[in-house]
Image (tube, grey):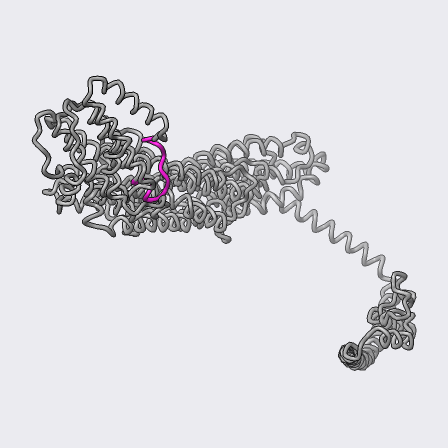
Amino acid sequence: MDADGSVSDESGRRRRVHGMLKLYYGLNEDGKAPELQSLDPCDINGPHFDPELYLNKLRRECSLSELMDHETCMVKQIRSLDSDMQTLVYENYNKFISATDTIRKMKNDFKKMEDEMDCLSANMAAITDFSASISSTLQDQHAQITKLSGVHTLLRKLQFLFELPARLNKCLELQAYAQAVSSHRRARCVLQQYSHLPSFKGIQDDCNAIMEKLAQELRQKFRDGGTSAKDLSECVELMLQLDEPAEELCDKFLSHARSRLELDLQGLEAEIKPYPPPPAPKEAATRRSSSSTAAGSPSDNSPKTLSLPSPTPNTDILEFIDRGCNEFVSSLCLVITSYQELFINHAQTGELASKNIPQMANGKLQAFVDDLAARYFSLVERRIQEEKGVGDNSLLVRALDRFHRRLQAVAKLLPGSAVPNRGTEIVIRAATERVKQYLSALQSFYMDSLTDVRQALATPRLSVAGAGVHLGGPAAGRDAPSSLPELLSSLSASILNQIKSVLASVHLFTAKDITFSNKPYFKGEFCSQGVRENLVVNFIRFVCQSSRQFCESAGDKGGSTPPALLLLLSRLCLDFETSTISYILTLTDEQFLVQHQNPITPVTALCGEAREAAQKLLNHYVKVQGLIISQMLRKSVETRDWVNTIEPRNVRAVMKRVVEDTTSIDVQVGLLYEEGVRKAHSSDSSKRTFSVYSSSRQQPRYAASYTPSAPMDTNLLSNIHKLFSERIDIFSSVEFNKVSVMTGIIKISLKTFLECVRLRTFGRYGLQQIQVDCHYLQMYLWRFVSDENLVHFLLDEIVGSAAHRCLDPSPMEQSVIEVICERG
């Protein structure tokens, strides 16, 4: 047999070695090359390779240098194959050496085992001889010994029956109820079988009286309920063995357990504060406004705005959950286990098996557990609602994890119970509510940051209050040229840091050591809808919506909003659209492994909302700044008597103010936006305005005014000129660059100037003053706009309208206008 095994092992090793060699040489199982191999005799790797043909072919087709290269390549391949073959031989040699050592060791071990087996065989033979000797010696007395043993057993049973009443009385005195019931159960069948005999009948009557007394003591002990759960379980088990009604015992058992569990619930309820009355709307608004006023600068990244006031109960949430789990849940699990062992899993025999007690007991247990668990869950939810602060999330997450973990014990004990699912719902609601709190905190932080930005923008106003400069207008750009970029950078950084801090806090809910974090009913929905949609996406939308609100009502909000804040928010929303939104959502998706199977808001949609908000804010900024300058121009036109004015000697101060404010706005916009694209300017842009006024196109307009038929001819020429000129859209959307913004502001300002001129009547000097003012504006405003022809056209219209409204249209000489404007 050993020889056969060694032969089979040897053949197996040979097959393995041959298999490796076949694999190395590219042969199949039959030792043949695959059918798909080439039959070409010049194929060096094929089975039909012919060296002579191969060499002749190389000599015919290759040059000397190619032959040398080919030789070098073949030498390298031969060396590589020799090296592989040597390695294969070395590896197999080591394996053969190892196999030889193993076989030699096995031989030694088998030799030792053979000696032990010989010794064991000798011992077994000796034992067999001794057993045969003993059997032959006791064979004659075996039947007599068996008979005597049976008589002895019967006498012991009879002795047990006669001593049973005394034994039961002794157990009753010592309160060894379990031993008494066990002894009675052993003898009950025998006493019932031989109850027709007087002696056995007396023993049975005495035992029944004693057991009735024992049953009364057990009932009293069960009613008192002052024992431990283990003693109570033993008491119920003994009463079931004494044929007490199972349904009544179920009700009594659950009633006693309820009283003990309600004490645990009362202890938990004592640690929870009662619900505070809701604050009045006025008080809440006052509290919000006071907190906004007391906020610091947005560059302060401390979690001041994320520290909502929270009540300070006697114990923290983790201690509360620990107490509930260690007391109530543990006791509930013990009650369930004991109840199931007594009434459900207990083997029923006889008449009890036909009453279907387990089904009845299971229904009562389900109702009992659901009722008490509902009260416990209510207390847990009330305590979770007290966790209003969002500074530290670790205690709440650990508490929820422990709560969820301990409820799994109930799930194992009661597979069909709804308690674990309701506990899971509490965990999900708590996590969702915490996300809502973080969203509210982020929103409050953003609004407080905007308040800080407004205060920072108002600071330069205090230092230049006597100069009468508008907030966020020229003063902001002139006095603090670097304040806007610093405020924007600080605001963006603080928002991003707060979002990262919030995501880090919320990420605790998805930690690997948290049991509920890996559950599909929590992880997918919480990460995609809870964190990404309800927290990050909603906050981004809140930033866009709250920013757009500054443009909705010019009377309530827009009028009191600093233009610099509009400009800053527009740039903030534009930065959100270009980079911030995609960065935040990518960070969220990576941290929380968001599954895109659920419907989520795409990045493009959020970027579109941010760009729309930025566009609306920038348009509103242009409108507000344009109206500020327009208001100065309108008052300067309406408050002046243009018919009786004196001959112009200088440029009006309001025009100098317009140029100064426009320059300041240009500086302010340039702090946040790029320059933009301009059309090529002519070399004499600063002087073209006056030449336009005195050109051949304007001369007929002024010259015709001196003749009686002038109004008809002048109006006709003016209207024809407008037909062929480009239409100017005053309130069109601007692009995100400085040139476009300045062009929009100047269009609104000059259009207002034009409409005010059309409503006034001018004298000779009034017309000349308009000429001087327009020439002065042309000297400076052309450099701010994308197309200088737009400024030429509007100023041309202003002077033309003044000429139409002039009683004595006598234009001022070009040289005089230039002297006045250069003199300033």
User: The N terminus lies in which quarter of the figure?
Assistant: bottom right
Residue 337 visible: no
Q: Where in the figure is residue 263, as x and y percent of width and height?
A: 40, 39
Question: Looking at the image, which residue is at 31% across and 47% down?
Answer: 672
Question: Looking at the image, which residue is at 62% across and 45% down?
Answer: 182
Between 573 and 272, the residue placed more toward the observer is: 573
Left or right: where 239 falls relative to 737: right
Stretch in magenta: 729-742
Q: Where in the figure is residue 20, as x and y percent of width and height?
A: 83, 71
Q: Where in the figure is residue 9, as x and y percent of width and height?
A: 87, 72
Instruction: Confirm whether the magenta stretch covers residue 614.
Output: no
Relative to 204, does residue 157 appear above or below in the rendering?
Answer: below
Residue 636 found in image quarter: top left
Question: Looking at the image, which residue is at 51% across and 43% down?
Answer: 407
User: The C terminus lies in which quarter of the figure?
Assistant: top left
Left or right: where 36 falls relative to 490: right
Relative to 480, does residue 92 appear above or below in the rendering?
Answer: below
Between 604 and 143, the residue placed more toward the observer is: 604
Question: Looking at the image, which residue is at 77% across and 52% down?
Answer: 151
Left or right: where 649 falls relative to 50: left
Instruction: Confirm whether the magenta stretch covers residue 737.
Output: yes
Residue 612 visible: yes
